[in-house]
Image: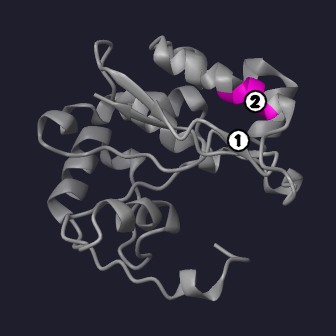
Amino acid sequence: MYGFPQRLYEVRYPAPGAPWLAERVVELLGEDNVEGSTDWGLDHAAWCPLVKMYPDADIPVTELSVDESKTPEQILQIGTKLKSLRDEGVLIMGSGDVVHNLGLVDWNMNEGYPWADRFDKYIKDKILAHDFDAVANYRSRGEAAGLAIPTPEHFYPLLYVLGAADAEDNVQVFNYERTLGSISMTSFIIG
């Protein structure tokens, strides 16, 4: 990450790793679909929510990288392959934004652009309807999708989570708002 206040670069979140979970992910996805590194540390997408959820850093964490070479449908399918981890007591969390276009941020806006509002509502409505294939097919939303998701790294984590969801899972929405014109951190609790 770059361009943030210095205090964010000084945050330490020393959660223990979970090698057993990393091994289980490799087992579920197959070795051809996994390449790993243990020298990276936790990305800000992981530690930012975790530091608030588990401030004592007392839970083991294994982080998946986002593979931008995959299609949204493939990312959704990876989530499906990880679904059994839920039954094994693993919290599957995706961190990112439904709308994330830093190039169009307006620091004077407290709401979203109309296209951001429309796109965020579309994604929310499809998730509430358990129409996860439509969420993966977000590009069908045309210009609004291109503006909302110019690059997929902030959106794909949601697809991992949706892939791991069950059709009967309850969905809760919180933080449903847009800000700075082109940012939405609409959040979902599934299951």
In front here: 18 or 92? Answer: 92
* Stretch of the chain drawn in magenta: 116-120
Q: Quadrant of residue 88?
A: top left
Label 1 neighbour load within 10 Å: few <14, some 14-19, many 20+: many
Where is residue 12 drawn, in percent x and y? 39, 83
Whether residue 60 is in magenta: the answer is no
Task: Tell me the element at label 1.
Answer: strand
Where is residue 106 drawn, in percent x and y? 87, 55
The C terminus appears in which quarter of the rendering? top left
Please report contact status of discs 2 and 1: CB closer than 8 Å, yes or no. Answer: yes
Residue 23 horizontal side relative to residue 14, left or right: left
In front here: 125 or 94? Answer: 125
Residue 85 horizontal side relative to residue 49, left or right: left
Residue at 41%, 70% in the rendered image: 42
Task: Tell me the element at label 2.
Answer: helix
The N terminus appears in which quarter of the rendering? bottom right
Q: Amino acid at mark 1?
A: Arg
In front here: 74 or 13? Answer: 13
Residue 56 horizontal side relative to residue 50, left or right: left
Where is residue 55 drawn, in percent x and y? 29, 70
Q: Which residue carries the number 1 mark?
A: 178
Label 2 neighbour load within 10 Å: few <14, some 14-19, many 20+: many
Structural distance between the alpha carbons of marks 2 and 1? 7 Å
Residue at 25%, 45% in the rendered image: 91
Q: Which mark is residue 117?
A: 2
In front here: 4 or 111? Answer: 111
In the rendered view, would you say 2 is above or below 148? below
Q: Which mark is residue 110?
A: none
**N-terminal-most mark, 2 or 1:** 2
